Image (cartoon, rainbow, N blue to C red):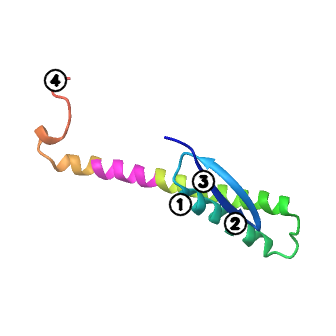
Amino acid sequence: MSANSTRVRIVGEEYTIRSDVPPEHTRAVAAHVDAAIRRVLENPAITDPGKAAILAAMSITDELFREREAQAAAAEQMRTLSGELRRWLPPGKRGERVGG
């Protein structure tokens, strides 16, 4: 896949991003970063753009970690449910090895 160049604007600064993902994805990511930095900058005590970017990165990383934890919990629930449902199936349909 060839790299796409996409121009985005984050907190008033324009950037050209080269990536293998569709431009729409890059624009959506940039919009998410822009919104996160702007939320941090709503705090009047935060005026340094570098500090705002770091705090926004922390917030986005927290979102990522929470989503990963939720995904792992959902996967575990699915494994548990699958095991419970497997017990209701006839022995030949349980996907278990016979003689093995």
The main secondary structure of the magenta stretch is: helix
Closer-to-camera residue (86/74): 74
Q: Which residue lies at the image location 28% right of the left edge and 49% below the top edge?
A: 82
Could you tell whether 2 is left or right of 12 in the image? left
Locate residue 81, reporting x and y percent.
31, 53
CA distance separating discs 3 and 4: 42 Å
Name the residue carrying label 3. 65
Name the residue carrying label 2. 34
How many callouts does the rendering have?
Answer: 4
Q: Which residue lies at the image location 80% right of the left edge and 63% below the top edge?
A: 52
Q: Tell me the magenta residue range.
A: 73-82
> Which is more N-terminal, label 2 or label 1?
1
**Disc 4 or disc 2, which is closer to the eye?**
2
Question: Callout 1, which amino acid?
Answer: Glu
Q: Which mark is residue 24?
A: 1
Local packing at callout 3 (Cα closer than 10 Å; few below 14, some 14-19, many 20+) is few
